[in-house]
Image (cartoon, helix red, strand yellow):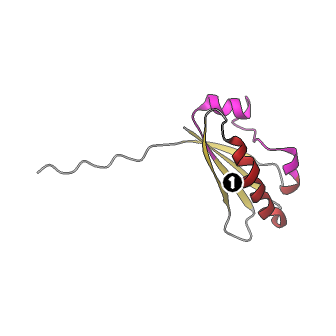
Amino acid sequence: MIVRIWEAQVVPARREEFCARLADEVIPALDGTDGYQGAELLRSVSALDHRVLVVTRWRDEAALRAYAGTMWRIRPVWAEGEFGFLEHPPSVAHFEHLPPAAEPAAPRP
């Protein structure tokens, strides 16, 4: 699994509106996309930090490439209509999901 983190600095006065758009339109539109496995929408808790993150999970690189294009590693996906919400273009980063560490075996009697 690959975790894709889309991050943007949002115009402070439009943060709530932008988050609602992501939650109501953008994230639900991913449902049914081959290889898409879910998402979370996050915003900073600090009034001075205007970052919004969309964390998506993808089955593999092929699924991400099909969704985001051949430059999926460096090019964020965003719509022209979103530009007015953002202080500058968004960025993306990718991470490999690691399983939890195995618990130590119980001591044998």
Q: Mark 1 points at which residue?
A: 53
Q: Does the magenta stretch include residue 62?
A: yes
Locate residue 80 relative to residue 46 in the image: left or right.
Answer: right
The residue type indicated by label 1 comes to Leu
Q: Is residue 62 left or right of residue 98?
A: right
Q: Residue furthest bottom?
A: 47
The magenta region covers 56-83
* x, y percent for residue 47: 73, 71
Q: Tell me if residue 105 comes above or below residue 65 in the rendering.
A: below
Residue 2 on image: x %, y %: 58, 39
Q: In which quarter of the image is the N terminus?
A: top right
Question: In the rendered view, would you say 66 is above or below 100?
Answer: above
The x, y position of residue 82, in whole percent, is 84, 50
Q: What residue sits 69% from the left and 36% below the top?
A: 73
The x and y percentages for residue 69 are 74, 31
Closer to us: 34 or 57: 34
Query: Is 38 contained in the magenta span?
Result: no
Residue 43, above or below 105: below
Q: At 74% from the left edge and 53% from the top edge, which residue is drawn?
A: 24
Q: Report crowding for label 1: few under 14, some 14 to 19, many 20 or more residues within 10 A (C-alpha).
A: many
Viewer-side residue, 105 vs 82? 82
